[in-house]
Structures are given as C-alpha cells and as structure tokens.
Image (cartoon, grey):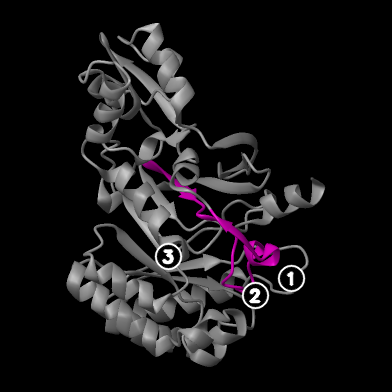
Amino acid sequence: MQHFFELSLIELQDILVKNGFEKFRAKQIFEAVYKNKIFQPQNFPSINSKLKEFVQNNFQFVSAELVGNKSSQDDTKKYLFKLQDGNFVEAVMLKAPSEDGNIRKTLCMSTQVGCASGCKFCASAMRGFIRNLTANEILSQALPFVCETISGNKRERKFEFENIVVMGMGEPLANFNNLMLALNTLNASDKFAFGARRITVSTCGLADKIKELAKIKFPFRLAISLHGATDEVRTQIMPINKKFPLKEVINSAKEFANVCGRMITLEYILIHQVNDSFEQASLLVNIAKTLHAHVNLIPYNSVEGLPWKRSDASRRKAFASILEKAGISFTLRREKGSGIDAACGQLALKKSKEE
C-alpha cells in the first residue's frame, strides 16, 4: 500500500485516472483529508462507494495505533503508539499559557524507535537505536488529535494543538528525509497548511545536518539540546559531543541563524551537580549572546535505572537569575508530567519490556 501523505495532488490524480476514476476526485479526497481531517476513507463526503473502497485498499493513512495514555496533575498527557511491526513510540501533549493569556497546546512528536545518540540521561538511549520512523508514522502521532466545533451552521474540524515540537524519541536530523516529508506535509498549503513558525525541530547538535538546514533555508524553527556550556560537561552526558564538539555546533548554529533569520532556542536540562553550576550559567550566557538565542531551562525528569537527579527549585531559580541579569531571553519551565514516566522514551521502554 502507498503512504497517502507522501503523495502530491498531481500524483493522486494520475493514479485515479489510470484506474478509471475522474481526475477531479483527487481534489475532493485532498479536501476530505487535509481540510476536514477525515482519515477513514469510508467517511469521505461526496465520494461514491467504489472509490472509497479503492482508496481504502490502496492507500495507508494511519501507520501508528494509539494504544494508551497517561495524564499528570498539570494536564500533561503522554500517549503510547504501537507500530505495525510491534514497536512502540510516544507523543506528549503539553499545555502552557501563551503571551495573549490563552492556554496553548503543544504536541511533542517522535521520529525514531530508540536513539543512537546515547545521551546518558535519556530513556530513549537505553533502548539503543532500533529504526527510523516513516513519514507516515511521524504524522500518525498527530492524527488522533482532531476536534470538531460548530459555529452557527458552520462545522469545522481542526487539530486541537497550536504548536508542534519534534523532540520526542530519537534524533530528528538523523532521520532527515522522512522528517522533511512529514514536515512538508504538515506545512504545505494544499495539505494541512500548518504554519512553519509553529513547528520546532530539536536536535542534539548534528552540526553537519544543521549546516544542511541552512543550505535549504529550512523554514521551521530550530532548537538545539545543549545541556552543557563546555565540552567537558557536555561530553559527560552527551557522547555526540565527541563527534560534534561545542565550537562546531555553535558555528553551524550561527550559520543557520544568519541564513534563515530566525532565533534559535537552546534547550538546557538542569541536572543536579552535573551542569547546574553558576560557572556553566555564565558560559551559557556567552553562547546565547553569540547566537542571539533564547534559552529554555528544563527541570530534569528522573529515569528509573539512571543516577541523575533534578536540580532543586532554588538552584534552578539562581541559575536562571544569572541569565536574567545578563539580559538573555529565557524560559524557566515548570515541572511537567510528574508521575507519568515523563522523560522521553520512558513509557515506551517500559511497554517494550512488558511485551
């Protein structure tokens, strides 16, 4: 079966015409899927039963089945998806207040089963790398989250989240082609038309791929998982730093920012007595100034079997104050997902062991 979301409108038209259907039906199908967000062919409006059956038998829409979820007291929700080969991945729905005072939802999506980057604090790394997700499997993590509203006589179906962050299980830039297929499907004006500025891709610092993003003038936002302001600290918890040292990551990020003209976010998980010293905070200030970057400070979510601990609240506040005094744009994230295996890959790791 062909993965539907990888098809352009012209390609779908050609397939339909070759199989005896009218060309204009392709546009009706696109509208049903991308505008009305209907992913079951039998529910497509204005399509006859013969064409519905053809689409059902020849195209795959959902490649990952939602099989479980957990909720925390702060309304963070983690969702478990089962792939057709029996592997599991996760997606997370985060709620946070926005600048306009409304509550915004962000969907955090995975791109790999396991991860080869080997970050010492990460549950995904404990599984090792198993395989890349297809573009359809990446997109399938968004498909269950559609809500329907009726205003007057107008019915509208739309995604219930406002933002997407690709920073779940796996290193997105190590699955470059499938990532780009998925993001282009989300963003394309004749498909989901999800705004590029509302999509962020997070990388642990694959400097060569960041340069490639600059070359193609990547339209989406970029976040870099820094987690250390010196090579010594970063290498201790992120082995990828041996291949792509901090200086190389910073230079590639600078190139990206100059070419693409957008502020980069530096992700920094605060781990007790590892990377939360005031010296690291001061050096992080220098990096953020060099890149004109926003810093996202994140409390560490502990993982069973790993020794790392979260910096306490007073330490996190003191660390943040150094950035604030230096005029760095930053966010000190509240603790999220406590009690629901919040760390990336933790829930999938447990389920895989059970299976």
Give above or below for 327 relative to 133: below
Residue matched to label 2:
120
Q: Does 191 appear in magenta?
A: no
CA gap, disc 3 and disc 2: 19 Å
In the picture of the structure, the residue carrying the numbered disc 1 is: 306
Whether 167 is drawn above or below 4: the answer is: below
Q: Which residues are magenta?
A: 103-132
Which of the two discs, 3 and 2, labels the residue nearer the N terminus?
A: 2
SS for dot 3: helix
Q: Give me the disc on residue 173.
A: 3
Residue 99 position, x and y percent, is: 30, 50
Q: What x and y, as percent, mark residue 63? A: 53, 37
* Marked residue nearer the N-terminal end (2 or 1): 2
Q: Can the viewer see residue 111?
A: yes
| Residue drawn at x 37%, y 15% as measured from the top left | 44
Q: Residues within 10 Å of mark 1 (few under 14, many from 20)?
A: few
Q: Is residue 72 depicted above or below 255 in this figure?
A: above
Q: Is residue 187 above or below residue 45?
A: below
Asked which quadrant contains residue 306, the reply is bottom right
Q: Amino acid at mark 2?
A: Lys
Cβ atoms under marks 3 and 2 closer than 8 Å: no
Give me the residue at 26% from left, 62% from top: 218
The amino acid type, in three-letter code, at marker 3 is Leu
